[in-house]
Amino acid sequence: MRLGRALRHRNYRLFFFGQGISLVGTWLTRFATVWMTYKLTHSGWLLGLVAFFGQAPSSIIAPFAGVLVDRLDRHRVIVVTQIAALLQSAALAFFAFTGLMTVWHLMVLGAVQAVINAFDMPARQSFLREMIEDRADLPNAIALNSSMVNAARLLGPVVAAWLVALFGEGWCFAIDAASYVAVIASLLAIRVPKRAIKPRAGHVGHEMLEGWRYVMNAPLVRAILMLLATTSVLGGAYTTILPMVAGETLAGGAHTLGILMGAAGLGALTGALYLASRTTIVGLGTIIVRATTALGVGLSLLSFAPNVWFATPLVFVVGLGWMVQMASTNTIIQSIVDSDMLGRVMSLYAVAFFGGMPLGALLLGSLADAIGPMNTFLASGLAVLASAMTFRVALPHLRRVTRPLYVRLGLVSD
């Protein structure tokens, strides 16, 4: 009951189950995209380039999107983004079924999805507060959301590998397009009180600057966002070169990639369920240190994996560490940031994530072509470990300066 306490809220239940169906489809598309790119090109650089186009536009647009999300009805914004995502997946299915698909189609349509995500992520994350009547259940809702994402991440690649082997990538894209019907229906059934939106006459650039200043004056929020951006570049894009590992180093195929991505999903799901079992955000700073350390150690050891059986548990650890760091960062931000600033701060969270990942994809893809994927994992893991240690040294100071805010919010006693 403690694991699922946020599900007692009707609106969140609708969102949770509708989104859960759609996310399985999302992971079908992600798997099919990376495998089709590898099949068409056999290039680490182009794998990185497709990943770059699939994420970079989000980091550019997200700050503007965050301002608009704070100005608009977040519920309506999410409905619009889901309809747009349905059309994008349908376009991928069309090009795959007609045999017209090229790596350029994957790049352009990936960029379209990135633009959609730039509006969807801050709107979705901010909307969680409006669906949860009891704020004490908000951390559980965020953790359950991560659990849902990673359960789909576990199931999606397994199903996708089977679909690709038997029927081809087109069916992955088509099923993804159909799955958006479930989430759109659930969103339309949600009923939340209208949020009081402050009239804003200021320029969008001024409000973006307000969000930036807010983060700069909140030491804990600033530090965890900087760590997320750093690890996004150095280690978060590890899935970009997994197809090379599966197809060349481990001498496998789509099924091998499915095993590795499924292991990462299982690790992430395990971490999300652990966070869902927690009842407070107190102590998440230490958990972020441990999760980032696990990510670095897992990537470093993965460079020595001789076969898929050795690599699978290491990818499990990598998936667990990466997800726990992201979800813990998200939970802290949503719990302590002022409501009227949340959309803008969540847009900076999107910049840290979506900005770091494409740069990391290009970096890791280029390194994989130059020094091999396994040496790339070693360099990436050591760099992530250095980032974890830097944050660990700063953590005692961050606790001292953040304690008055935790006391004011009732998270700790005076």
Image (spheres, rainbow, N blue to C red):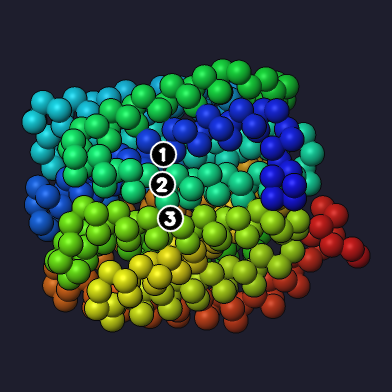
Residue 331 vertical position relative to residue 21 in the rendered view, above or below: below
Q: Is residue 52 above or below residue 125?
A: below
Which tag is nearer the camera, tag 2 or tag 1? 2
Helix, strand or loop under label 3: helix
- Residue 265 is tagged as 3
N-terminal of the two: label 3 or label 1? 1
Residue 311 occupies quadrant: bottom left
Residue at x-position 35% and y-position 68% = 312
The image quarter containing residue 263 is: bottom left
Which kind of residue does numbered mark 2 sit on?
Leu
Q: At 66% across and 65% down in the image, what residue appears?
A: 284
Q: Are marks 2 and 1 in contact (CB under 8 Å)?
A: yes
- Residue 343, how many percent across, how many down? 58, 39
Residue 219 vs residue 207, the one in the foreground = 219
Q: Is residue 70 found left or right of 107 in the rendered image?
A: right
Query: Closer to the observer: label 2 or label 3?
Result: 2
Alpha carbons under labels 2 and 1: distance apart: 7 Å
Which quadrant is home to the C terminus? Answer: bottom right
Q: Amino acid at mark 1?
A: Val
Mark 2 → mark 3, Cα distance in angstroms: 8 Å
Reading the image, the residue beneath label 1 is 24
Query: Residue 130 at x, y = what percent?
Result: 69, 32
Q: Secondary structure at mark 2?
A: helix
Badges 2 and 3: C-beta atoms under 8 Å apart? Answer: yes
Q: Amino acid at mark 3?
A: Gly
Check disc 3: other Cα within 10 Å, few if <14, some if 14-19, many if 20+: many
126 horizontally vs 194: left or right: left
Residue placed under numbered mark 2 in the picture = 155
